[in-house]
Amino acid sequence: MENVLGFVALACGIIVGLGAIGASIGIAIMGGKFLEASARQPELMNELQTKMFILAGLIDAAFLIGVAIALLFAFANPFVLA
Amino acid sequence: MAAEGQAPTASEYIVHHLQHQQMDFAFQSAKQTSIVDFGVFNLDSIVFSSLLGLLALFLLWTGARRATSGVPGRWQAAVEMLVELVDNQAKTVIHNENSRRFVGPLALIVFVWIFLMNFMDMVPVDLLPQIWSVAGPALGFKDYLRVVATADLSTTLSISTMVLILCIYYSVKIKGLGGWGHELFTAPFGSHPLLWPFNFLMQMIEFVAKTVSHGMRLFGNMFAGELVFMLIALMGGAWALSATGIGLAVGHVIAGIVWTLFHILIIVLQAFIFMMLTLIYIGQAHDKH
């Protein structure tokens, strides 16, 4: 039983950690491109900003799904034989 | 386990707050027996989503009812801005005027309804559950209440499944049953008969992936947000119970402010993304290959 809890705790950490790496790198690359594009064409800055927020929501999706699953394991663990 | 009458431990508090008011189809209290259990439904999600849907319709109706073509009042101006926003998005994505007559208002109500359901996350975490812990058992219900309907996977997946059904409907309507069937077996790889199974497999994977990601994105954001609010409330509760210095209380207030501000952005953004993807998926159903 303690083994299961220990493994679940590790699993939650790995899910959130690896997901955060992917999401952060994705947002960073997209943000960098947005800044470059704004510097090249400042008149497009507002439209691009709208699109940027939409893309941020899409990039964060997989990460947040992982966080939701990890939090579910942390608090309402389906593997615990209650 | 805490004894009766003692304050619940942190895990118990959170586990208690994460339970839905579940009923089976005989309207008796039941608990789901596995992750996917079609014999129970979440009564609290159904009630909250229905009430908020009616509220969304009512708000938009009041904006349209007293619409004048002269100088608009503030509410009419607000509703007009919202309708124009959705209409512009619909025009860029869906090129068929006939479809837009239905899909435009669909996108509008999806946006307003999901925004209202998400907004229930802004209500203080314990407010409605505390009222329910008194009122519920008195009415014969169990003491479980989940307020945010979009933090329930069944709600978000059901909305995205409806979008999938609409996509299939529009695919058949625009391309015809034969045209859609042809596309199922010949896109995206090619029309050689050897490729038919792979094309069909890819199409099925695409349907499942789009629908599941559409629903789970909204669920993940709202569930994580709600859970962080509960954890912040636990910080305040722990201070109130232990009273060891002011650190926890200050941390509770600051964390609460920061997370609320961030979550206000997430609420609007996720509703907008859900609406955009609805429009994009239905627009994709209009494309011929």
Image: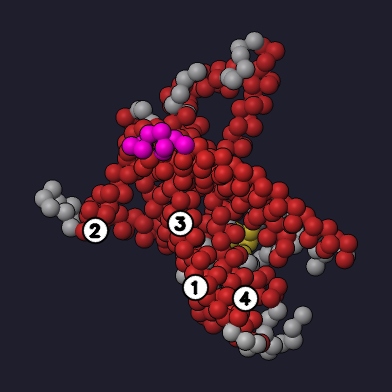
Q: What residue sits right under mark 3 in the picture?
A: B265
Nearest the eye: B179 or B192: B192
Q: Residues within 10 Å of mark 1 (few under 14, many from 20)?
A: few
Q: Which residue is mark 1?
A: B124
Secondary structure found at label 1:
loop
Q: CA distance from mark 2 to mark 4?
A: 39 Å
Give the percent coordinates (x, y) of residue B241: 64, 87
| Residue A50 locus on image (x, y percent) | 41, 43
On the image, numbered disc 4 is attached to which residue? Answer: B234
Labels 1 and 2 share a subunit: yes
- Marks 3/2 same chain: yes
**Which of the two residues, A35 or B177, is positioned nearer the viewer here?**
A35
Q: Nearer the viewer, residue B86 or B34?
A: B86
Closer to the chain start, of discs 3 and 4, is 4
Which region shows up in magenta?
A: A36-44
Eyeballing the image, is B29 above or below B237? above
* SS at mark 3 in the image: helix
Counting residues from the start of the chain, the first of labels 1 and 2 encountered is 2
For disc 2, the neighbor class at 10 Å (few under 14, some 14 to 19, many from 20) is some
Amino acid type of the residue tagged 1 in the rendering = Pro
C-alpha span from label 3 to label 2: 22 Å
